[in-house]
Image: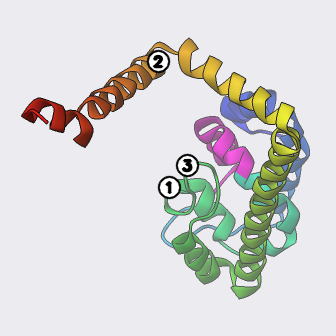
Amino acid sequence: MRGGAETVAALGRYDDLVDDAVRFQLALRAGKIQPPPGTAGVALQDFGRFFRSQGGRARHYWTQYVRPHWKLWLGSAALSAVLLAPDEYLDEAGDIIEGGIEKIAGLGGELLAGALRGTIRGVGEAAKDSVRDTVATTTDVFFSDVWRGLALAVLLLMAVFAIPFTRRRVMAMLGILRGAANRSPKSEKGRRGG
């Protein structure tokens, strides 16, 4: 397998991609990965360059979208287009942007685009479930009885006063409240003489 220094470096960084690199090379040799319109095509070096330059973003994209739908990417120019111009298809985290899905549909067909939309929906549902579970666990831990609620209050107070920026802000707000209490209507009567 000839992938150049960048491919070797990428595989050293992400050793779980070795099988993917071999599969990619075999698909290239079989002509199953097409070049995007107006380009000469891709090589194994482009695979390595993609992972080397994009880092975790590339790995997330590959493991989330390519690996589970490998056969749907074959026979089209969609995969090589993403490898050569990731900013047109991916956000900073490595998820496919909405406009990217439409471009992929144009290059890889509606079947691939539909599978990617389903993956994106699934990721969104998983994130929603994770937030819901976190809130439920926090509620169970800190709000199930009075003592746990008091423990949370103590932890919050410690955090407020342990962080200088927060402490200054809280003290400033208390000073404002104290000043407002001193200017209450009752104290205004006393100043006017009664």
What amino acid type is highlighted by mark number 1? Asp
Mark 2 and mark 3: span between their CA atoms? 34 Å
- Observer-nearest residue: 52 or 36? 52
What amino acid type is highlighted by mark number 2? Arg
Of the two numbered discs 1 and 2 in the rendering, the one whose residue sits closer to the viewer: 2
Residues at discs 2 and 3 in contact (Cβ within 8 Å):
no
Residues at discs 1 and 2 in contact (Cβ within 8 Å):
no
Which element is circle 1 on?
A: helix
Q: Earlier in the sequence, mark 1 or mark 2?
A: 1
What amino acid type is highlighted by mark number 3? Glu
x and y percentages locating residue 44 in the rendered image: 72, 47
In the rendered image, which quarter contains the C terminus?
top left
In the displayed structure, does residue 53 sit left or right of residue 2?
left
Q: Earlier in the sequence, mark 2 or mark 3?
A: 3
- Observer-nearest residue: 37 or 58? 58
Q: Give the residue number, with chain letter if any, for mark 3.
A: 92
x and y percentages locating residue 148 in the rendered image: 84, 33
Whether residue 23 is situated above or below residue 147 in the rendered picture: below
Q: Is residue 63 visible?
A: no
Q: Give the residue number, with chain letter if any, for mark 1.
A: 87
Q: Residues within 10 Å of mark 1 (few under 14, many from 20)?
A: some
Q: Which residues are magenta?
A: 42-60
Mark 3 and mark 1: span between their CA atoms? 8 Å
In the rendered image, which quarter contains the N terminus?
top right
Of the two numbered discs 2 and 3 in the rendering, the one whose residue sits closer to the viewer: 2
Q: Earlier in the sequence, mark 3 or mark 1?
A: 1
Which element is circle 2 on?
A: helix
Which residue does the image show at 88% across and 46% down from the upper left?
A: 140
Whether residue 3 is situated above or below residue 63 in the rendered picture: above
Of the two numbered discs 3 and 1 in the rendering, the one whose residue sits closer to the viewer: 3
Q: Give the residue number, with chain letter if any, for mark 2.
A: 167
Mark 1 and mark 2: span between their CA atoms? 42 Å
